[in-house]
């Protein structure tokens, strides 16, 4: 149930007219009164002798009784209450109870207050009602409406439980403004998949990902096809900006502009400028983290590998950092998802765009992000954008699967942190993001994992037995589960590739399984494949490495030997 307090007005009869008329798209069906301050209030929807002005005059009587100097300019209060599409259909009597509960909770008409404001609740659709009230009490005083929106939300949570409706998470005032009903109806009339507000918010977020200054930011907005208007002071200093879609026009044919701050709280120019500041602490890499992965891999594939490393470091901070440091990393990963959404190939583009769109809610909370601690992730987002879209570098599916796999664990960790802090909406958004990432991963990993599984199935029996022994020695508690998974042969092929480049498979496995829990993974073997290929600096794409399945047994790494490519191999690279 979503209650929404609308902007106050000055013409009661105008709002009554809107509530009872069919609407621009004939969306108002059978408009009628379900409850009011007076059981005998006229209902223009059901009584032919009642008119809109009749109901408006009665509602306005306490206002008109005041001398003109004491009358409030904006005296019309308007609240809509809408149910979710999957909720059961409520009766008029149930909506009447909801209306009385809402006016009592918000302070319009407290229970048993005979001199409260006058109000009326109109139902003109199955799933919602509108409540109109005038803001002068019968005794001539003003109602106390402090935090009326928050009180309406709190009452809605109680009503959801009592009526068996979908229970929404309580908000904290950090969410972006929802599209208005007029915006939604306009989008439906024009057959738009999103309202202009939502499309602009998504486009601006994508344009801001990884930017370093105003020039770059506004250039990206223009390149994305938006109309951009910059607001400047008489001194010439830039104060703000607003954007519009070229094909979104008002009745006069003029573009409909939205300021960045009205799209989302963190898209105002001052908030975006905070991303560009260069002062503040650098995010320190973990002592055991792999900071070299991706350096020798150029283009989109290399950018994805570097993003994987940046997210791995952020994951360790979420495990052990302060709340302020964690909030900064969560904000940074939002930029990485935005960059991935704009540079992904067709098989994953839709799901990654949905993931980025949903996760933006999880990036905002009342926990202030520590200044400068998102720098590594912002640089990763920049690398993704400036290395171009995936699809032509040979490692498209594989490197994308690698970065999505890491993003999934990072988003899951962020969801757990939000849940611990009672950030209900943010936690729900993060969990929903993880589902989109799960689907995107399956699309990206399908081909490279099939290649790896095929290679593993063709390993010689002695080699396969050796990798099985490494697995049982390194992770005995997980070995049998991994051996039973379809991805085991892909992991065996990866262990063989790592062994051929001088790594100790048992050491790699131990490090990969002890650094981070695996219980949220659909396939532990899949996760280990990408962790090992990143840690051993192997090509994400198995088709870019020579087939080692029939190679002779490699030289074993000596106890205490540092894992990693042998020096002679590094020189040849």
Image (tube, helix red, strand yellow):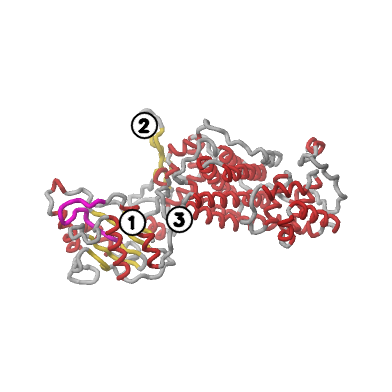
Disc 1 packing (10 Å; few <14; some 14–19; many ≥20) = many
Residue 137 part of the magenta-drawn span: yes
Task: Check the image and name the residue furthest to the right.
Answer: 552
Nearer mark to the viewer, of 1 and 3: 1
Q: Nearer the viewer, residue 15 or 426?
A: 426
Nearer mark to the viewer, of 2 and 1: 1
Query: In screen coordinates, is 34 left or right of 505?
Result: left
Residue corresponding to mark 2: 233
For the residues bearing labels 1 and 3, Cβ distance under 8 angstroms: no
Question: For numbered disc 3, what is the local secondary structure?
Answer: loop
Q: Earlier in the sequence, mark 2 or mark 3?
A: 3
Quarter of the figure that contains the C terminus: top right
Residue corresponding to mark 1: 152
Residue 275 lies, in percent from the top left, at 50, 37
Residue drawn where x is 73% and y is 62% of the image: 484
What range of the chain is rendered magenta?
130-144
Q: Earlier in the sequence, mark 2 or mark 1?
A: 1
Residue 333 lies, in percent from the top left, at 55, 45
Residue 239 part of the magenta-drawn span: no
Residue corresponding to mark 3: 194
Residue drawn where x is 79% and y is 35% of the image: 571
Quarter of the figure that contains the N terminus: bottom left
Query: In screen coordinates, is 168 left or right of 37?
Result: right
Badge number at residue 165: none
Tell me the distance, in whole angstroms, between the alpha carbons under discs 1 and 3.
Answer: 27 Å
Question: For numbered disc 1, what is the local secondary structure?
Answer: helix
């Amino acid at each position: 149930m979503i209650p929404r307090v609308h902007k106050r007005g000055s013409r009661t009869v105008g709002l009554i007219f809107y509530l009872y008329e069919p609407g621009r798209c004939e969306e108002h069906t059978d408009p009628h009164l379900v409850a009011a301050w007076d059981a005998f209030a006229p209902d223009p929807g059901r009584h032919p002798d009642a008119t809109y002005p009749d109901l408006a005059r009665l509602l306005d009587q306490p206002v008109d009784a005041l001398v003109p100097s004491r009358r409030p300019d904006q005296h019309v209060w308007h609240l809509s209450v809408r149910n979710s599409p999957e909720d059961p259909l409520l009766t008029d009597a149930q909506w009447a109870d909801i209306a009385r509960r809402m006016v009592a909770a918000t302070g319009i008409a407290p229970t048993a207050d005979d001199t409260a404001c006058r109000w009326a609740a109109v139902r003109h659709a199955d799933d919602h009602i509108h409540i109109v009230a005038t803001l002068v009490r019968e005794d001539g005083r003003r109602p106390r409406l402090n935090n009326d929106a928050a009180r309406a939300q709190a009452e809605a949570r109680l009503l959801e439980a009592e009526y068996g409706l979908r229970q929404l998470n309580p908000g904290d005032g950090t969410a972006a403004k929802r599209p208005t009903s007029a915006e939604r109806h306009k989008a439906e009339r024009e057959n738009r998949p999103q309202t202009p507000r939502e499309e602009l918010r998504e486009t601006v977020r994508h344009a801001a990902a990884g930017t370093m200054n105003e020039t770059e930011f506004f250039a990206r907005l223009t390149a994305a096809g938006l109309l951009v208007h910059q607001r400047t002071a008489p001194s010439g200093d830039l104060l703000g900006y607003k954007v519009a879609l070229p094909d979104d026009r008002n009745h006069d044919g003029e573009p409909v502009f939205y300021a960045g701050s009205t799209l989302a709280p963190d898209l105002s120019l001052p908030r975006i400028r905070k991303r560009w500041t260069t002062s503040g602490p650098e995010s320190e890499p973990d002592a055991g983290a792999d900071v070299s992965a991706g350096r020798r891999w150029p283009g989109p594939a290399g950018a994805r590998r570097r993003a994987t490393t940046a997210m791995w470091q952020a994951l360790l901070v979420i495990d052990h950092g302060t709340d302020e440091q964690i909030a900064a990393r969560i904000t940074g990963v939002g930029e990485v998802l935005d960059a991935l959404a704009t540079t992904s190939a067709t098989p994953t583009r839709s799901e990654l765009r949905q993931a980025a769109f949903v996760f933006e809610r999880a990036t905002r909370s009342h926990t202030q992000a520590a200044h400068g601690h998102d720098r590594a992730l912002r640089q990763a987002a920049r690398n993704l954008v400036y290395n171009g879209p995936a699809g032509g570098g040979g490692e498209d599916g594989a490197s994308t699967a690698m970065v999505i796999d890491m993003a999934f664990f990072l988003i899951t960790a962020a969801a757990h942190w939000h849940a611990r802090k009672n950030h209900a909406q943010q936690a729900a958004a993060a969990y929903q993001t993880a589902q989109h990432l799960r689907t995107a991963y399956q699309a990206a990993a399908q081909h490279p994992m099939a290649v790896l599984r095929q290679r593993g199935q063709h390993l010689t029996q002695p080699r396969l037995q050796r990798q099985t022994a490494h697995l049982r020695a390194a992770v005995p508690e997980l070995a049998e589960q991994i051996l039973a998974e379809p991805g085991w042969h892909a992991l065996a092929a990866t262990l063989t590739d790592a062994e051929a480049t001088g790594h100790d498979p048992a050491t790699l496995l131990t490090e990969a399984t002890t650094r981070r829990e695996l219980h949220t993974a659909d396939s532990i073997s899949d996760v280990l494949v990408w962790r090992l290929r990143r840690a051993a600096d192997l090509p994400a794409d198995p088709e870019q490495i020579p087939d080692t399945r029939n190679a002779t047994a490699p030289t074993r790494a000596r106890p205490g030997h540092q894992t990693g490519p042998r020096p002679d191999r590094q020189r040849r690279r």
